Image (tube, rainbow, N blue to C red):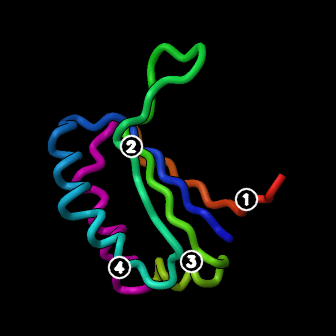
């Protein structure tokens, strides 16, 4: 399985981010072709010795393989998702995106 992890920095307007993310962005993400699952959290907290949390929102989407992921992001829905990001992601840094295959322990 291939996972895509997106980390969003704290936006200029957190309430706008939350509303747009829940009401507009996630319904589009739910239509992503070929995905196994997706989810997000707006309840990201520091852990251990961390005093501050540099991440405001975490999003993860899972695909069966890289080819399916590539086709999904090239689809009309994938393009719509990417075009929507500037409408809410107004943090001091752009969203950080990581793609990886998780190996079982």
Q: Are dots 4 and 1 in contact, CB under 8 Å?
A: no
Label 4 sits on residue: 31
Q: CA distance from mark 1 to mark 2?
A: 21 Å
Q: Position of residue 91 (x, y in %)?
A: 32, 39
Label 1 sits on residue: 102
Q: CA distance from mark 3 to mark 4?
A: 13 Å
- Disc 2 crowd rating (10 Å Cα; few below 14, some 14-19, many 20+) is many
**Magenta region, residue range:** 75-91
Q: CA distance from mark 3 to mark 1?
A: 15 Å
Q: Which numbered tag is attached to residue 69?
A: 3
Q: CA distance from mark 3 to mark 2?
A: 21 Å
The residue lying at 46 percent from left, 64 percent from top is 38
Per the image, label 2 sits on a secondary structure element best described as strand
The residue lying at 53 percent from left, 75 percent from top is 36
Q: CA distance from mark 4 to mark 2?
A: 20 Å
Q: Are dots 3 and 2 in contact, CB under 8 Å?
A: no
Relative vertical location of residue 42 with respect to residue 103 in this rendering, above or below: above
Label 2 sits on residue: 57
- Is tag 1's residue or tag 2's residue first in the polypeptide sequence? 2
């Amino acid at each position: 399985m291939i996972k895509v992890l997106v980390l969003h920095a704290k936006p200029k307007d957190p309430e706008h981010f939350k509303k747009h993310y829940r009401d507009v962005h996630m319904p589009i993400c739910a239509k992503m072709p070929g995905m196994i699952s997706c989810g997000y959290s707006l309840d990201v907290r520091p852990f251990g010795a961390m005093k501050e949390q540099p991440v405001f929102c975490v999003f993860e989407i899972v695909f069966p393989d890289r080819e399916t992921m590539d086709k999904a992001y090239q689809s009309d829905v994938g393009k719509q998702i990417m075009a929507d990001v500037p409408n809410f992601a107004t943090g001091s840094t752009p969203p950080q995106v990581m793609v990886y295959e998780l190996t079982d322990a």
